[in-house]
Image: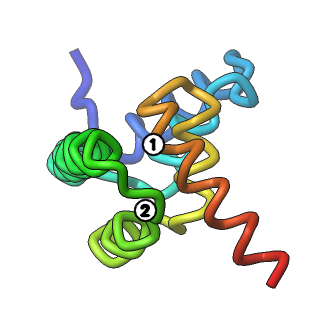
Amino acid sequence: MAAYNNDTATFHLQLLTKTLDMQKYPFIKLIIERTITNEEYDELFHLLHTLNSKYEVQKEDGLLDFSSLLIHFAGMLNEKLDPNETIFALKAEGYFVELMNTFIKIIEEDGRK
C-alpha cells in the first residue's frame, strides 16, 4: 500500500468537501478551511462549555448584560477564527443556540450604535 502523506490527505479532504453541501455545515467548513487541529477544536468546545455554564448561572441570577461573556469568547478564541463568523456558524449548526443567539443580539445591537 502506498504511503498516505499529508498532501494526499489534503487532496482527498478537498474532494470530500465538494461532495457535501457545505452550506449546511458552516462550522465544519470553517474548521476545515482554517486548518483547526483536533486539540484546537477541543479547546474551543471547552471554552464554549465554560461560557455556556457561566451564561446559565448569570441568567439565573437575573443578569441581563452578557457582553462580558462575548468579550471573553472573542479574546480566548483561536486566532485562526473570526469571532462573529464562528458565532454565526455555531448557531447555524445548532451548537449552544441560546448562548449564540445572545451573542448575535449583542453583535447586532453594537452594529446599530
Task: Inspect the image, locate mark 2, and give the three-letter code of the amino acid beneath it.
Answer: Phe
Task: Inspect the image, locate mark 1, and give the three-letter code of the amino acid beneath it.
Answer: Leu
Tell me which numbered mark, 1 or 2, is placed earlier along the sequence. 2
Which residue appears at 27% of the width and 71% of the height? 76
Looking at the rendered structure, the number of numbered marks drawn on it comes to 2
Q: Which mark is residue 48?
A: none
For label 2, the crowd category at 10 Å Cα-Cα, with few meaning under 14, some 14 to 19 and many 20 or more, is some
Residue 52 figure quarter = top left
Residue 78 figure quarter = bottom left
Q: Nearer the viewer, residue 56 or 16?
A: 56
**Residue most toward the front?**
62
Quadrant holding the N terminus:
top left
- Left or right: residue 40 versus residue 90 is left
- Left or right: residue 107 versus residue 108 is left
Above/below status of 28 relative to 76: above
* Helix, strand or loop for disc 2: loop
Give the x, y percent position of residue 18.
71, 26
Q: Which residue is mark 2?
A: 66
Regarding residue 97, the answer to whether it shows in the image is: yes
For label 1, the crowd category at 10 Å Cα-Cα, with few meaning under 14, some 14 to 19 and many 20 or more, is many
- Left or right: residue 15 versus residue 3 is right
Regarding residue 79, the answer to whether it shows in the image is: no
Q: Give the alpha-carbon distance from disc 1 to disc 2, as whole Å.
A: 9 Å
Give the x, y percent position of residue 85.
62, 58
Give the x, y percent position of residue 69.
35, 64
Q: Which residue is mark 1?
A: 99
Q: Are marks 1 and 2 in contact (CB under 8 Å)?
A: no
